[in-house]
Amino acid sequence: MSRLNPDDHSCVYCAGPLFCQSERDEMTAIADLLVDHGYRVYLPHRDGMEFRLIHEILTGRGWEGPDAAQFLHAAIFALDVYQLAVECDCMVWNLNGRVPDEGAVSEAAMAWTLGKPVVAYQDDVRSLIAGRVNPLLVGMTDFQTVDEIGELPHALLLARTRQTQPVLEQSQYSERMKLACADGAQLWSALCDEHVDGDNEFIADVVARLFSPEKTTTLQA
């Protein structure tokens, strides 16, 4: 299939299961294919934070493990909401699994509510109901799914071309979503800072400053 040449501003949120290496490999394959066809992508486990590494730093600074996990989860939530609502203008959703990944279901619901095109991929029959995908899921993709990864770029281009619903303006977001996006934007800016270059100590500082109960960067044991 030839390169589809989407516009330069198109960025795709890649949502799906990430709980084992084969699932992460499949999500990476989807993201890489989209990049090969000219899209920018956000792949959470690759482009966001690695929970384990930041959690280790936070607990090393004196946070109790459950407390650090709680506000680190808040940071991940804000980052992903920001990507869905602001950075990305469409979504590819991997429905594979015994049941669809619950995080990806939430992400798809947000994208659909915002009016952004959602394309679903599934070649796994385990979650089908009488041979069909749950209508409350596949309804967000106009009751269509793609069963071959290679078809995703073309399906995504068609979904964007056929889009008639206007995307919700940021001024129309709820106050809670605006707050999540504002926090997520600061965290994303830190992750993208070329001077940081993988400095997880600095990222832990930002997470603690934005999301910890004390909103501090200096807590020590």
Image (spheres, rainbow, N blue to C red):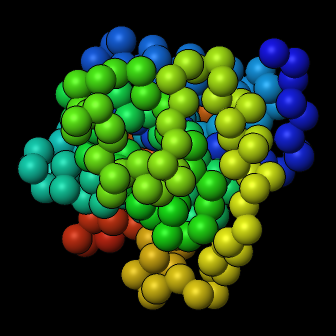
Q: Residue furthest front?
A: 130
Picture residue at 35% right of the left edge, 28% below the top: 96
Q: Residue at x 81, y 15 (%)?
A: 1
For residue 29, above or below residue 62: above
Q: Quadrant of residue 150?
A: top right
In front: 24, or 190? 24
Residue 58 picture quarter: top left
Residue 152, percent from left and from top: 64, 29
Pinpoint residue 24: horizontal percent, then vertical percent: 41, 20
Q: Is residue 104 left or right of residue 100?
A: right
Q: How many marks?
A: 0
Q: Is residue 62 left or right of residue 92?
A: left
Q: Is residue 143 left or right of residue 160?
A: left
Is residue 88 shown to the viewer in this render?
no
Residue at x-position 86% and y-position 41%: 6
Residue at figure coordinates x 88%, y 45% from the top left: 8
- Front one among 1 and 17: 1
- 197 vs 53, left or right, is right
Position of residue 171 measured from the top left corner of the image (x, y, whole percent): 63, 87
Answer yes or no: is residue 151 visible. Answer: yes
Residue 32 position within the rendered picture, expressed as x and y whole percent measured from the top left:
65, 21
